[in-house]
Each structure stands twice: as C-alpha cells, then as structure tokens.
Image (spheres, rainbow, N blue to C red):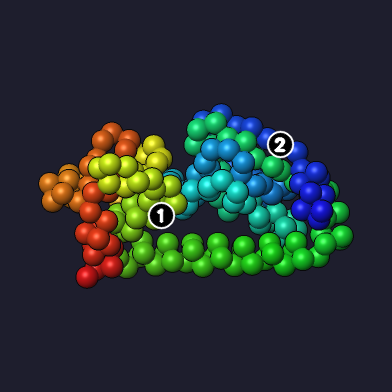
Amino acid sequence: AELNNVAQAANTRKRENGSFYFFQEDPAKRIYVLLQGKVRLTQSTPEGQQIILDYVNLGESFGVVAFLSETYYPVSAQAVGNCQALVWDEAALNRLVERWPRIALNALRILANHTRDFQDKIRELSTERVERRIARAVLRLAQQTGRKIETGVLVDLAITRQDLAEMTGTTRYTVSRTLQQWEKQGLILAKREQIIIRYPHGLVSIAEDL
C-alpha cells in the first residue's frame, strides 16, 4: 500500500532516443525511476571530453541527488532508445519524505553506492592499462544487459566504438584495435554496434589481469 501511494505521487515522462532527462549542472529538482528503455549517464570534463559513467536499466533510479537540497546534477541523463520514467518533483519528494522518512535513508544508501561505483571508475581510469579497462567495460555491460544466444553472450545494447572509448578513457582507434585483436583470438564477435562474447573466461582473465 505504501509503494502504491508513492507511485501515485509520480508523473510519467517520455523521452525519444538521444534526448535528455536532464543535463550536467542543471538544478537537481526531480528524481526518476526507469520504466522503459535505457538511460546513459555521462559527464563532461572542463576540457570538453565526455565520459560515460554508467547505464540505467529498467527499475533503477537516477537523479537521486535531488534528495539533497539546492544541489545540481553531476551527470547528464540521455535516453538510449525510446524511454519512459516515473518522475517525482521537489514538492512531491518533500511530502513523501515527511510521511515516510525511510525514503530519505534509502536515497542516501543509493547515493553512497553511486559514489563508490564512481570512485571505482576513477581508479580504473587512473591506474589500469587500456585493454583491462575495455574488458571490464564489456563484461559490465554483459552483466547488465547480456542475453544468451547460440554463438555466445550478446551485449543487448547498441554500443559503438566511441561509446566504449568514452567509458574507458581512451580513443576509438584503440578500442577498434583491441576488439579486432580479441576477435582474432576467438574471444568475441564484434559488429558495428554489437558485441557477442564467445569466450567469457578469456575476457575475465584480461579484466582481472590473470
């Protein structure tokens, strides 16, 4: 009953592929839960480089920083495919938290998990060799969206070489060269916007530097 009341306090917001729910540095006034599609979370550096930090999957929340007063979104949230999300504005959030304070505690836990994930991402970008970073990114995507097919595990997300480059802090050329090498070794099948993992243990060995 409590969850139904919370859901009824939300509106729905649709976004077409490539459009944004919010931009980095926008005032954080709303929190979202994804109902359809996927959302790409990106951050731009002062030098203008874009980094893909994560993908939001069905049932996951984003924009949770809105629970903190007078703050800004640290990332941009872009629709991948046609998306639909539940959205609670600032007034609705305040009413819900007053009635169920546990919501605020859960939000802080989500923020803590996001902070840990982003710290891990920064550590990877700062200390790990490129091939290991790319392997980790592909395996992370497979864990989130992987689907078993006859030839292996399909990363069920249209992912470009540029996307992988922005996820791993490298160049599209380096990503293309690495994927070609793995394909020759029989680890993956790589098409224009599609990756099939043929030998997951091989990628794990690279990712863990075994």
**Residue 72 higher or lower than 189, as above or below:** below
Please report whichever mark, 1 or 2, sits nearer to the chain's N-terminal start.
2
Measuring from the top left, give residue 202's x and y in whole percent: 21, 59
Q: Residue at x 77, y 43 (%)?
A: 10
The residue most toward the bottom is: 210
Q: Residue at x 42, y 62 (%)?
A: 121
Which one is closest to the eye, mark 1 or mark 2? 1
Which residue is the site of mark 2? 12
Which residue is the site of mark 1? 143
- Which quadrant holds the C terminus? bottom left
Mark 1 Cα-neighbour bin, 10 Å: few <14, some 14–19, many ≥20: few
The residue most toward the front is: 150
Q: Is residue 108 left or right of residue 51?
A: right
Task: Give the amino acid type for the residue marked by disc 2 in the picture.
Answer: Thr
**Residue 204 higher or lower than 17, as above or below:** below
Q: Residue at x 44, y 51 (%)?
A: 144
Task: Give the amino acid type for the residue marked by disc 1 in the picture.
Answer: Gln
Which of 35 and 89 lies nearest the eye of the viewer? 35
Measuring from the top left, give residue 93's x and y in whole percent: 79, 52
